[in-house]
Amino acid sequence: MKIITNIVILIVIILILPVDGIAGNHRYNTCVDFDSLGDSAGNYIDLDLYEGYFYVCKIGYIEGEVTLGWDVKNSINANISIIVLNNDNLNNFISGNSYGHSNMDLAELYLDWGPIAQFNRANSDFSENRHTTTDLVGDNYYLVINFGYRTTFHEEEVNQNNIFDNLKYYNSLTNTRDLSFGSAYVTASIDLDY
Amino acid sequence: MDHLLRNKGWLPSAKLISNVYSILLLVYSNCIIVLYFREGWNYLMELYFWILIGAILLVSLTILLARPPPKDNTTQYDYDNLDGTIGETTGENSIDKNSQKSNTEKDIEEPEEEEEIPPEVIEKIERRKWALGFVMFGSTFIMMGAILLFLSEFEFTTFLGSCMMYVGIIALIKGASFELQKDNTYNDLFSVSFFLLIFFINFILLTELLGVFGTYAWAVATADRKAGDLLLIYFLPYVIWKLVPTFGAAENIKAKSSVLFETQTVLFLTIFNYIILIVTSAEYIFWPILNQYAGPGFQVSLYLLFFTITVRMILDVVTSTPKEEDGPNFRQWLARRKK
């Protein structure tokens, strides 16, 4: 009986296993800092997996004046949007409620890739970055890459994944990162300086 | 880039701790990870913080060493068997003889009249003494801390007052636990409640009063900073709570001599972290700093639970196999085969 109980607990643990390694965050990946990138390309997002959904990585708790930014490579100039949200706005973003920027300076970090995609394609440019210096209220902040999950800032109907759907995003076991030419992916990193 | 360079500096308290290396090896090994340079950190305050922690440990060690050794149940039974024979009456005045005899018996018994107090009562008295001691100590510290906070607005006195109140509250909680143990009403629920209290007091002290946490976002913190923060949040309250000795703890330690954590304890930690994570993520309670650490804390506890259950299952299988078989072992089997 004890063994059965233990096995059940183990199965539950495997189902809710973190997506981000032992020192990461359970619900979302932790963003990779641009200053400590090294050989890594940052957070890797497979466009085929995330089509019509969104990707969130957690920056963490920030309070006070900082310089915050992001660096994103969009290998096929896909139609995506990038935004930095605080915890409350992220909850609204996911649940389909109206959301926005908690700080005017953070609005500078918003980018809709659609209008610039054609221009970038013509110039063979696949990377974009944004930076801003701002005084932030103490909160957790996230880098959100929207692959078509939300179309407006207003309230709308959304299709959230369940826990089993989310398991397909867990690729740390295989850790396959296809960065070859022609493959559809997005890599992202944040840049935070105090 | 510059946050990597900041971690190279070491504080004088690292040297201070290294002096008691041989005594507190475990504490030292964890503190050494925790002690790294934090921007804006006051050396004097940091030193005082570790002196306070050291003082608690010293008091704890003193109490631990001053306690009587646990009784060995196998040798404590000492029966007094009195042998006697029924003799014939010799015609003497039996009353006189009895009275004489009773007098001599009284003489013998007189020194034994100093009643031996049962060990349970002694233990109760001792517990009451410790409870009173802790309560007095705690109340004094809280009062002094509050007075300091009220009278002065200097940074150092604010820090000193906060630390005094912190130590005082912990002493009060410990005193309450002694009092509950005295009447055998101390159970797991109390233990968990006290641990939670210490956890939150410790977290508030380190965030709101000392500003140790929340200075860096998790994404840009280095690995040693992450490890240090998690140790300060989860391990420090555990050490403070567990190192302060408790009556009857020796028996528990004997019974649970395993290096592994109890599955129940780790499961509790995991559920606790998960609740904190959900509550702070959904912002039922707005506590973003706690949310930042609850995520990794939950992950670590999940891995710890996974490891604990797996190892315990393996150990159960290994140790229970001979008992379940209950049949001849290999040698016996071989001997039978030879016959």
Image (spheres, coloured by chain):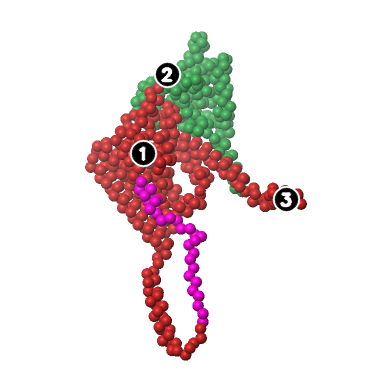
Chain colours: A green, B red
- Pick the quarter of the image with the C terminus of chain A: top left
Position of residue A70 measured from the top left corner of the image (x, y, whole percent)? 44, 21
In what element is the residue under mark 3?
helix
Pointer 1 local density, CA inside 10 Å: few below 14, some 14–19, many at least 20? few
Subunit ID for the residue under disc 3: B
Residue depth check, mark 1 versus mark 3: number of the one nearer the observer: 3
**Above or below, comparing residue A45 to residue B181 in the picture:** above
Amino acid of disc 1: Asn
In what element is the residue under mark 2?
strand
Residue at 61% x, 47% y is: B319
Position of residue A109 measured from the top left corner of the image (x, y, whole percent)? 42, 21
Residue depth check, mark 2 versus mark 1: number of the one nearer the observer: 1
**C-alpha separation, residue under disc 1 versus residue under disc 3:** 60 Å
Residue at 49% x, 12% y is: A125
Residue A118 in magenta stretch = no
Residue B233 falls in which quadrant of the image?
top left
- Name the residue carrying label 3: B335
Residue at 42% x, 64% y is: B118
Our reading of the magenta stretch's main secondary structure is loop
**C-alpha separation, residue under disc 2 versus residue under disc 3:** 81 Å
- Name the residue carrying label 1: B19
Residue depth check, mark 2 versus mark 3: number of the one nearer the observer: 3
Magenta-colored span: B58-86
Residue B65 in magenta stretch = yes
Q: Is residue A94 left or right of residue B123?
A: right
